[in-house]
Amino acid sequence: MEAGETSSSSRKSTSIPGTHPGDRFIRHVASSDLPIREVEPGRFIAELVEPASVWGKTWVRLRRALIGRPLRTAEAAHERIGKAKALAVFSSDALSSTAYATEEILRVLVLAGTAAYAFVQPIGLAIVLLLAIVVFSYRQTIRAYPHGGVTYIVTKDNLGIAPGLLAAGALLSDYVLTVAVSISAGVAAMTSAFPSLYPYRVELAVAAIVLLTVANLRGVRESATIFMLPTYAFIVSIGALILLGLASLAGLGPQPHPIHTEVSPPSSPLTLFLILRAFASGSTALTGVEAIADGVPAFKEPQADNARTTLLAMGLILAFLFSGITFLSYHFRLVPNERETIVSQLARTLVDGSPFYYVVQAVTASILFLAANTAFADFPRLGYFLARDRFLPRQFRFQGDRLAFSTGILTLGALTILLVIARHASAAALIPLYAVGVFTAFTLSQTSMVVHWWRSAQGELRRVPWHSLVINAIGAVVTGIVTVVVIVTKFTHGAWIVILLIPALIGMMLAIHRHYVSVAEQLRISSEEARHRLRLLPRRSVAIVPIASLNRASLTALAYARVIADDVTAVHVATEPETGQTLQQRWREAGLTIPLVIVDSPYRELLGPLVAVIEKLHREKGGPLITVVIPEFVPVHWWERLLHTQTAWRLRRALAQIPDLAITMVPYHLRD
């Protein structure tokens, strides 16, 4: 519709004013045609934009079939939960580690022969003691950070940016490994019950990760309804299995079914280093203990008290399950087997062939998959905090259609799939990489809390909360020692990968931060400087229009250039001698007064000469207000774009490297 015309439609119209240099126009469009509605003068609300093309509509249908309809920001809901539900939501990661922690201890000790099993219970007791220290330490963290003590934030606030990034790097690697280990262990539980599935364990693991990724893209929250049944079923089933085993040992229950597992000859002497390595392997039982401290805002009031009580309950349950599995595995002399888990062997020993055996395997696999799902909540949330502080790309801050942090979810899914494929979905091959990040984060968090309690006294010794400070100090020292033990004993078994990865992640985050800081510094301008620069802007503007021939698209671009600029020049690169002559002749016949510059290109190169002549004209004409107006025709169908050279798009990319040059694309839409 031309300037000055009015719509003859009877539909309600909205006037949208727009301005160009030297020209003011009003365009009338039917409000029902625009995905926007006015709520007050100068303020609009955008509605959902639906694509018009067949390809676009197909993509939207597929997208919504996978992840659901888009949600408004106002539809975000945060469920406050009580202690019983919170135990299910936040404990699945920690409790699930009992499915493989004992097995990892035995896997190391068996290298020295079954005689080394004498150290199974002392190692298990040491891990339970370590668990108690960590639980009581995190109870102090909850007290100090009642709104959620995310390790990265706690460390950054108390120790500084560098330790904060170390904690973030450790946690990012930990979350990736949480998914990989949990899914691999869950698949192992399935293949233990159904051995015919063992050759397809990698495919099953990848499929599970894809399903979890899609589910979380749909905006699956830490719903208590989803988490309660598998978590409590696991606690009850494994608890019942342990009680059944204790009764059997006391002669009060069913006689155990002996399992004959071939034991390899000892391949390593029983040394202190081997015992420490077994302890480091079993310490994976503590993974996920920090989840309750991170999730305090989800609790009902009083939040801190409820979270502290839930953490204590989780610690007691975890200690019981881990101790029970370890005790029974020692007494029944269970030996790790690549094709069958220790939990499966224990269940077969006590209830072989019964439906309860399959129940145990099912609930074990379920809680392991839920443990992986908690990482899909934590990784994107940490990514959000890092992106907010400009240490990760801004894409990690944005919520997708379903109010989920889509970039973080997709990144975690992709990294985990690569890791599972590389390690053949073997939990035993992944666990040596696991504990480094976990205990590094534990140590930094507890050290941060020591600093926090000391600072809270503001230099007055009598005001120092010594009880809390001492608990966190013990936690920091003990977890620090365990971190060193894990690094030393696991270094050659894969821990070196994480040790190199974490500094690389820190370097990447610092580089990203430097870039964002540099961009902000270069864009920052004071109000006084803004007023001064506006006064210095030239009144005269220049436009350069590159054209291939005289056609409707190029004429539209020339017309637009004349509207926005006082000085317009057209530029044509002649890859063949006759094209330049033909264009000049048509130019004269059309009576165009706009200057036309012809560039002969004897080597038939188009983009290079075009950029060169535009840069030359830019230098000659001077001034910052030079605009390159690029004509572009838009085909009706997406596949028709493949039939064209995309010169306009390539030229735009090339010109973007030239300073003080504005670029405007003028599309001309073709008809079918």
Image (tube, grey):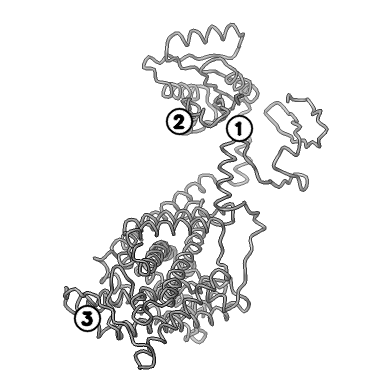
Inspect this view and state whether residue 170 appears. Answer: no
Looking at the rendered image, the disc whose residue lies closer to the viewer, 1 or 2, is: 2
Tell me the number on the disc at residue 114: 3
Q: Quadrant of residue 175?
A: bottom left
- First along the sequence among labels 1 and 2: 1
Tell me the number on the disc at residue 654: 2
Please give the residue where the numbered disc 1 appears in the rendered image. Answer: 537
**Closest to the observer: 456 or 637?**
637
Disc 3 and disc 2 in contact, CB within 8 angstroms: no
Secondary element under disc 1, as helix, strand or loop, is: loop
On the image, the x and y values in percent for residue 148 come to 54, 71
- First along the sequence among labels 3 and 2: 3
Q: Is residue 608 above or below residue 420?
A: above
Q: Quadrant of residue 668?
A: top right
On the image, the x and y values in percent for residue 72 come to 65, 54
Secondary element under disc 3, as helix, strand or loop, is: helix
Tell me the number on the disc at residue 415: none
Specify the amino acid type for callout 1: Leu
Specify the amino acid type for callout 3: Thr
- Residue at the farthest front position: 353
Q: Is residue 308 above or below residue 2?
A: below
Give the Cα separation between the discs numbered 1 and 2: 26 Å
Looking at the rendered image, the disc whose residue lies closer to the viewer, 1 or 3, is: 3
Inspect this view and state whether residue 537 appears. Answer: yes
Secondary element under disc 2, as helix, strand or loop, is: helix
**Closest to the observer: 56 or 401?**
56
Specify the amino acid type for callout 2: Ala
The quarter of the picture where the C terminus appears is top right
Horizontally, residue 267 falls left or right of residue 6, namely left
Question: Which residue is found at the position 43% from the left and 21% from the top?
Answer: 606
Looking at the rendered image, the disc whose residue lies closer to the viewer, 3 or 2, is: 3
